[in-house]
Amino acid sequence: MNISGNTILITGGGSGIGRGLAEALHAHDNQVIIAGRRKSVLDETTAANPGMKSATLNIEDADSIRTFAAQIEKDYPALNAVIHNAGIMRPEDLKSPNLADAEAIITTNLLGPMRLNAALLPLLLKQPQATVMTVSSGLAYVPLTVTPTYCATKAAIHSWTQSLRHQLRDTNVEVLEIIPPYVQTELLGSGQASDPRAMSLTDFIAETIDILKSKPTPAEICVKRVEFLSCAAENGKYDEAFNALNSMEF
């Protein structure tokens, strides 16, 4: 991936990892457009980063995604990168399941990227060079059992990304996957942002950007901190990782 000179759309770009990526890529001379549901959060982010743009998006609604993608193509015809970052994470008790939570997680984390990618891919294929980037999780490899549907959607995103990469292998579109560890954001609540067990957001973004700068850019963007999960099975340490992860209190 060229680290500069792109027009990049980032979903969930107003907070957490999305905002961190948006600000870092904005600083590398890219035109960045952040998208999300909360206009106030988007406005605060763009105000802090002059030149950054924003657009509201309801990632759970298929019709809204189609309308959004058409407007993005009209407003930013040079769009050549999209980072599918928007996601939600909720604890669930599978003994007394709340299917509304499970369905919302699936719709946001899995159907959202699939729908938006389908809507934007024709534009990306028109560009000389383009990038699709998904954001999965170390939990795609070893689940945190208190958040089962979240982990399942990230495992699905990981698998879907591999298929997308293979199907687009002879096109101008490269497909990358960011695989974060436990990072200090508010994904699982405000306490996560200061949890000393989590990787600092600043450090995660810095290491991720360094990997994106490498030539050739690896298909899977794994910071060192996530390898305990992402390499657990191949290192013969799956049970160790599973037990360590699920003995933690959240």
Image: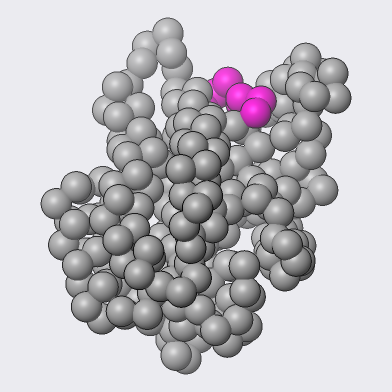
> Percent x, y for residue 135?
54, 49
> Percent x, y for residue 139?
62, 33
Residue at 69%, 65% in the rendered image: 212
> Percent x, y for residue 100?
27, 28
Residue at 44%, 90% in the rendered image: 51
Name of the residue lying farthest toward the top: 95
Residue at 73%, 62% in the rendered image: 216
* Secondary structure, magenta segment, majority class: loop
Q: Which quarter of the rendering shows the N terminus?
A: bottom right
Quadrant of residue 124 in the image?
A: bottom left
* Nearest the eye: 27 or 162: 162
Quadrant of residue 27 in the image?
A: bottom right
As for residue 129 lying within the magenta part, the answer is no
Name of the residue lying farthest toward the bottom: 50
> Percent x, y for residue 99?
29, 22
Residue 106 as seen in the image, left or right of residue 145: left
Q: Which quarter of the rendering shows the C terminus?
A: top right
Span shown in magenta: 141-147
| Vertical comparison of 97 with 45: above or below | above
Any part of residue 32 in sight: no
| Vertical comparison of 212 with 182: above or below | below
